[in-house]
Amino acid sequence: MEIFRAEIAPLLIAEQQLLREKGKQENPINMEELTEVNLYDLTPLDAKMWYQANNGLVTIAEFKEYDKDVQASSKFSRKALMAFIGNKLSPQFLKEEIKMEQEKYK
């Protein structure tokens, strides 16, 4: 978990800095959800999903299971991280859904 926290902390700091300067520029990395994350509220499952998402190894079914776990949690930080991961994975999931729909009609 400490390695995971060390990796994600600079992203939080960068995003907070961008939000402070928002009047000067648009947010180029679009990670506002991360400003709400307390690193110590995150779990090993959050770390696992983070690494899988960064390596393109998450299926829709896996993300749905992760979503259930996060929604059952009372930690807002987990929900904010999940929102960020979900936004990041949306293009991948859209491609998968289109491919599954196309397969139905073959």
Image (cartoon, rainbow, N blue to C red):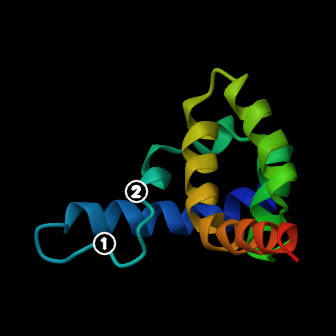
Q: CA distance from mark 2 to mark 1?
A: 8 Å
- The quarter of the picture where residue 22 lies is bottom left
- Whether residues under marks 2 and 1 lie with C-beta atoms below 8 angstroms apart, the answer is yes
Q: Relative to residue 81, is residue 59 drawn left or right?
A: right
Dot 1: element: loop
The amino acid type of the residue labelled 2 equals Glu
Q: Residue at x 85, y 66 (%)?
A: 104
Residue 55 vertical placement versus 70 (above, below): below
Q: Relative to residue 14, is residue 18 drawn left or right?
A: left
Numbered label tally: 2
Quadrant location, the C terminus: bottom right
Q: Residue at x 63, y 63 (%)?
A: 8
Residue 79: x and y, percent? Answer: 59, 38
Residue 28 vertical placement versus 80 (above, below): below
* Among numbered discs 2 and 1, the one appearing first in the sequence: 1
Residue 7 vertical placement versus 44 (above, below): below
